Image: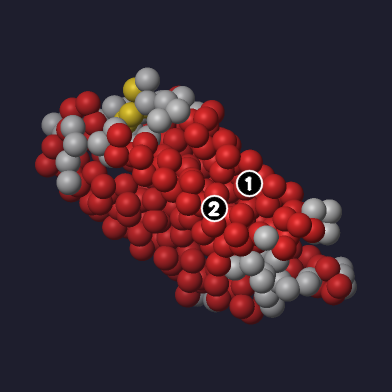
Amino acid sequence: MERSAYIPALAVYGLLAFSTLLPGVVPVVARHARALAMVAITAHASVLAFGILQFMWGASIHEALSSVSLILMVWYCLDLRSRARAILAPLAVVLLGTALVVPQGSVAALSITGFSPWLPLHLGLMFAGLAGCAWSFVVGIAYLLVRWHLKNRRFEALGALPPLEVLDRAQYRTTLLGFVFLTLGIGVGGVWAATTLAEPWFLDAKVIFTLIVWAWYGVTLLARRSGVSGRWGAVFSIIGFSGMIFSILFVNLLISGWHGVVR
């Protein structure tokens, strides 16, 4: 399916992002935010599902970014009372916009393995892990924002943002959620590759970089159990998710290997 089919959803996401970043400028959008979000989410999900099924689950970077953007907007739709949505909508716009401009292509390894029941399971787990890490990223930004306002005694700017204690707990849970799904996704991918690919798949650049990011989140959780939380937990999650985006946008596109994109 042509990527232009995503444009209506992207336009609505952009309008919602503008409305949440500048509240009061477009009051009609704010009043109907949930309805607009639900319509755009439905359109986005339909286009994404059709595209994945059309290529027999041959998902690429485009589908990965689009899926995470969709999950963030679902969260936005369910959490309209919190000002954290001001971070969700812009991030979803950036991810979907990036998804529309990355080169189209499938993962190189699929030319050898073809479609396999392992593929949807591997992709589903990895996408869920990516979504959990994106969620942790948003919570981390919200934590630093609340902390900055409190430090500068800008109490009126806090609005409906949750207190630091709530954000700190959410930070740990979302990081743990992302880490668990990443672990399962990496495990499924490893078993699939070991039983299908003859060459040393574990030397693939994407595998190595993904394991580095996975280890980073593992260290983050261990540090949390050792008493390191709050600001440092937020910073760790932001760095970890930034590493994942770097892996998706640059490692897949610029470095050849089993996860490289075949155009």
Residue 243 shows in this picture: no
Can you say which quadrant of the picture contains the N terminus? Answer: top left
Quadrant in the picture for residue 80: bottom right
Residue type for callout 1: Val
Q: Position of residue 234 (x, y in %)?
A: 61, 63
Identify which residue, 117 or 35, lies in the foreground: 35
Can you say which quadrant of the picture contains the C terminus? Answer: top left
Q: Residue at x 51, y 42 (%)?
A: 245
Identify which residue, 54 or 166, lies in the foreground: 54
Give the label, 1 or 2, closer to the camera.
Answer: 2
Residue 4 shows in this picture: yes
In the image, taking residue 58 as reference, residue 158 lies left or right, namely: right
In the image, taking residue 12 as reference, residue 189 lies left or right, namely: left
Q: Are marks 1 and 2 in contact (CB under 8 Å)?
A: yes
Nearest to N terminus: mark 1 or mark 2: 1
Q: Position of residue 211 (x, y in %)?
A: 37, 47
Q: Residues within 10 Å of mark 1 (few under 14, many from 20)?
A: many
Which residue appears farthest toward the top when viewing the image?
263
The residue labelled by disc 2 is 39
Q: Residue at x 69, y 77 (%)?
A: 163
Q: Position of residue 204 (x, y in %)?
A: 31, 34
Residue type for callout 2: Val
The residue labelled by disc 1 is 12
Q: Residue at x 83, y 68 (%)?
A: 157
